[in-house]
Amino acid sequence: MRRFVSKLKKLIKKQRAMFPTRLPVGATELKSFCDSIFEIYDLPSHPSYRHAIASMIMHLGPTKDSAPMAFFAKSVRKSMANQVAYDLIDKIREEKQNELKAVASNSGDSSDEQSIQNEGVSGTKEILG
């Protein structure tokens, strides 16, 4: 029964978080505001996410004194997804560069490496139009 009640409370908090909430005005308010977002939306309490929320608050319009907590939670999740995607892209880029270096060192001819790089550039130009 307690588990049901706690899930119900969390559901109600999530519903309330969709409506605009007054923005925090003090350091302790900002900490509790971030903690609430992390708790309601099951996000990790990481300093960089607190920084992201503080930065988002600063970038709101000059007359905006309230915003839904859901906005901040979704933005933090998007930031997390962006980081994972960037890491994957970076890993693929490094693997490709290592592959090119291996091909160039095996052949001993830098013209092959140059032609491979040119093919990559022309392929990118074709995709971008």
Image (cartoon, grey):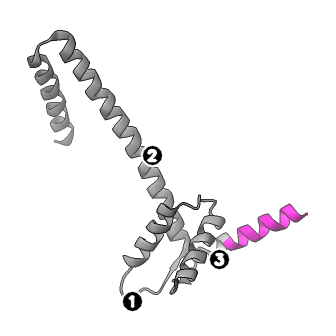
Q: Residue at x 31, y 32 (%)?
A: 94
Outermost residue toward the left in this view: 111
Q: What's the residue at 60%, 65% (across, down)?
A: 38
Q: In the visual, does 65 lie left or right of 61?
A: right
Query: Which SS type dominates the magenta stretch?
Result: helix
Question: Residue 72 in magenta?
Answer: no
Residue hosting label 3: 16
Q: Is residue 125 above or below residue 20?
A: above
> What kind of element bears circle 3?
helix
Say whether disc 1 or disc 3 marks the residue closer to the N-terminus: 3
Residue 17 in the image, given as x and y percentages of width and height: 61, 74
Q: Tags 2 and 3 in contact by the CB under 8 Å rule?
A: no
How packed is label 2: few (under 14 Cα within 10 Å), some, or many (20 or more)?
few
- Amino acid at circle 1: Thr
Residue 78, position as x, y percentages in the image: 46, 57
Residue at 42% x, 85% y is 64
Foreground disc of the pair 2, 3: 2
Q: Which residues are magenta?
A: 1-13
For badge 2, the amino acid type reads Val
Mark 2 or mark 3, which has the lower sequence index? Answer: 3
Q: Is residue 119 left or right of residue 69?
A: left
